[in-house]
Amino acid sequence: MKPSRDIDQLLAITAALRTPGTGCPWDLEQDFASIAPYTIEEAYEVADAIARGDLDDLADELGDLLLQVVFHARMAQEQRAFDFGDVVLAITSKMIRRHPHVFGDAGRRDVGTVNAAWAEIKAEEKRIRAERRAARGLPDDGMRGGGVLSGVPLAAPALTRAVKLQDKAAKVGFDWPDTGPVFDKIREEIAEVEAELAVGDHAAAAAEIGDVLFAMANLARHLGVDPEAALRGTNEKFVRRFNGIEEALARQGRNPAAATLEEMEALWQAGKAAE
């Protein structure tokens, strides 16, 4: 086989990898559950390439993510459930259905009207999906039921899921009007962490820490900040500054294990000031 710009070649390569007897032993032993972590990992690598502004890397990572879609579709085809063509049909149908102002006769409308129509269409899709699953004797999938908080994947990153849940609750009026009460809530939750630690209840403290993070996600939402992106930025800042500590100590012929906390803190503050 040769590299190609044609999606059919990728489908053929994946089929070859999954062909019993002649395919790849590793690929043949995979199933949806074993591949799912790789799918999530590849999506994060796409986001990482975007954050770094590396378009060459982005093209490569998007290819890896596309392979995940093709691989899942191939396994489904082997089970006679659906194939890649069905995946493409589903998404093209959805995009056309959700954009009547572009592909239909609804005419061009303002953003607010378009968003309202989008929500109505999604709600109808959700209802039809639930009916179809019920008719086939399938249980509710746990995230697309009829409740206000439905539709948020359980596997989403926790901070992202918190924001999405809060957004849904806000749409029916369950939200503070500004950040003032949010700051009060953050202080309240931090005090509760301290109170649980004071009595030695670490399990309760852990639960309260979750409440602090949820409240911080709510603050980020009110400010229009993506908490996942904000935390990724802080992680990278920590790596950069700690690497600076290591480099400074290395110039002295030392390493962090041989330095005191006070020495490392001084180097940290020096690096911070230099930034």
Image: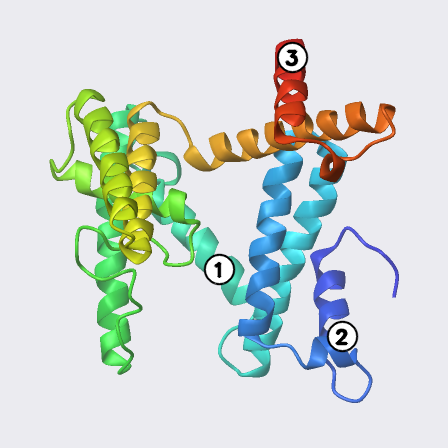
Toward the left, the furthest residue is 173
Q: Mark 2 points at which residue?
A: 17
Q: What residue type is labelled 2?
A: Leu
Q: Residues within 10 Å of mark 2 (few under 14, many from 20)?
A: some
**Mark in front: 2 vs 1:** 2
Q: How far separated are the C-alphas under marks 2 and 1?
A: 24 Å
Q: Which of 94 and 144 is in front in this view?
A: 144
Residue 260 appearing in the image: yes
| Upstream in sequence: badge 3 or badge 1 | 1
**What residue lies at 50% left-to-right and 66% top-to-bottom?**
86
- Name the element at disc 1: helix
Which of the 4 quarters of the picture holds residue 98? top left
Q: Position of residue 239 (x, y in %)?
A: 65, 33
Q: Which comes sooner in the sequence, label 2 or label 3? A: 2
Q: Where is residue 3 in the image (x, y as percent from the top left)?
A: 85, 56
Q: Pick whichever, 239 or 167, lies toward us.
A: 239
Q: Do the residues labelled 2 and 3 touch (CB within 8 Å)?
A: no
Tell me which amino acid carries mark 1.
Answer: Leu
Residue extending farthest top: 274
Q: Tell me the kind of residue under disc 3.
A: Glu
**Which quadrant of the view contains residue 211?**
top left
Q: Which mark is residue 89?
A: 1
Which residue is label 3 attached to? 275
Decide which of tag 2 and tag 1 comes sooner along the chain: 2
Residue located at (17% from left, 25% from top): 181
